[in-house]
Image (cartoon, rainbow, N blue to C red):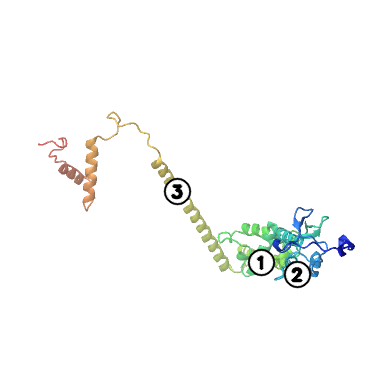
Amino acid sequence: MEVTELVPPSLRPPPAAPSWAGPAEVPVAPSPGGRWQLPLAGWKRPAEDDILGSVRPGDPRRAQCQRPAVGGSRREGFAEPRAVDFAFTAEAVASLAPDAAWVEGDGGGVVALPCAPAAHAQARLDPEAELLVAEVRRVTDVGGSDYRRVLDLHPGESWDMQVVQTRFRQLMRLLHPDKRSKVGEARAGGREICDEAVNLVLEALQAAKRELLGGDEQDPQRRAQQDMRRLQEVQRQRARQAMHRQQQSAAGKLAADIDRALAPQTEAAPSAEVPGRPDPTGREIAGLLARLNARSEVPLQGSQWAAWCLDALDVRDVTQAPGTQV
């Protein structure tokens, strides 16, 4: 009896491959997911692969665990196929959904769930809050030096008290503590900065009233200067309006001339019965006169035109037709 008969089949070594077949290949089998992977029965995976379940995608330790060994055998040179697929899926999902939570699904895979954005991400402001931030920064940068700059008035509007009050109401509707948004107040620098902007706007209104409404009645010279400035500004504004109307009129006239020049010609064929159409002799005379006037250094007028015409057409008598001899 041979010794191999006493050894159970499960403990017998696999039969040796013939020498002509080369090195033995490791048998593979399809996995339930449809992928071909190495059989893991009887093979203990490396210890560093045990931490794959607790390492998030993108961690440097995952790359170290999946790095193939150099110079090893076939099983030692490659990581587990499932770990490689997991890393590829994790990196792809991370690039598409950066704000996602990683959880392990029922089938052992990884699922990305949407989560709240990061705390440091700033929410987009509404237009009113953005306008509040811009006005607070502008007013605080200007200071209380000039009410025209604080209220952002046009040079032509700085002498009109009604326009000044309208602009003041617009700013206070935006900067008032009971009407400004909390998000815009926080972005503008806080409550103190916004209150400082409100005080500057109030001071600008008082300065405009003192200057425009004649608060200094004991100084008639200053009031006369203000009246003169106001009158000059009104005159300049009227001159600008008149120039604007003149430019509009000239532009409209030019557009009408261009339209008439580009209009299609719908006239009928030339005929002798059409009144007002010059005959060939008249056209010849007109062309000749134009050439003679262009050659002469001094433009011809009155009787000089008649003399030139008679001389050019060789006419000795005015009553004769052109081209006839005396």
Kindly identify the residue that appears in the image at 24 percent across and 49 percent down: 294
For disc 2, the marked residue is 61
Label 3 crowd (10 A; few <14 / some 14-19 / many >=20): few
Mark 3 highlights which residue? Answer: 251
* Separation of marks 2 and 1 at Cα, in angstroms: 48 Å
Tag 1 near tag 3, CB within 8 Å = no
* Left or right: 1, with 73 as reference point: right
Q: Residue 137 carries which label?
A: 1
Query: Residue 179 at x, y = what percent?
Result: 74, 58
Q: In which quarter of the image is the C terminus?
A: top left
Kind of residue sitting beneath label 3: Ala
Which of these two is toward me, 260 or 306? 260
Q: Which residue is drawn at 59% across and 69% down?
A: 219
Q: Which amino acid type corresponds to the residue marked 2 in the rendered image?
A: Arg
Q: Do tag 2 and tag 1 residues touch (Cβ < 8 Å)?
A: no
Residue sitting farthest toward the top: 273
Q: Marks 2 and 3: which is nearer the front?
A: 2
x, y percent for residue 132: 69, 61
Q: Nearer the viewer, residue 85 or 164?
A: 85
For residue 90, what is the image quadrant?
Answer: bottom right
Q: Which mark is residue 218?
A: none
Q: Image check: 39 left or right of 263?
A: right
Q: Can you tell which quarter of the image residue 18 is in? A: bottom right
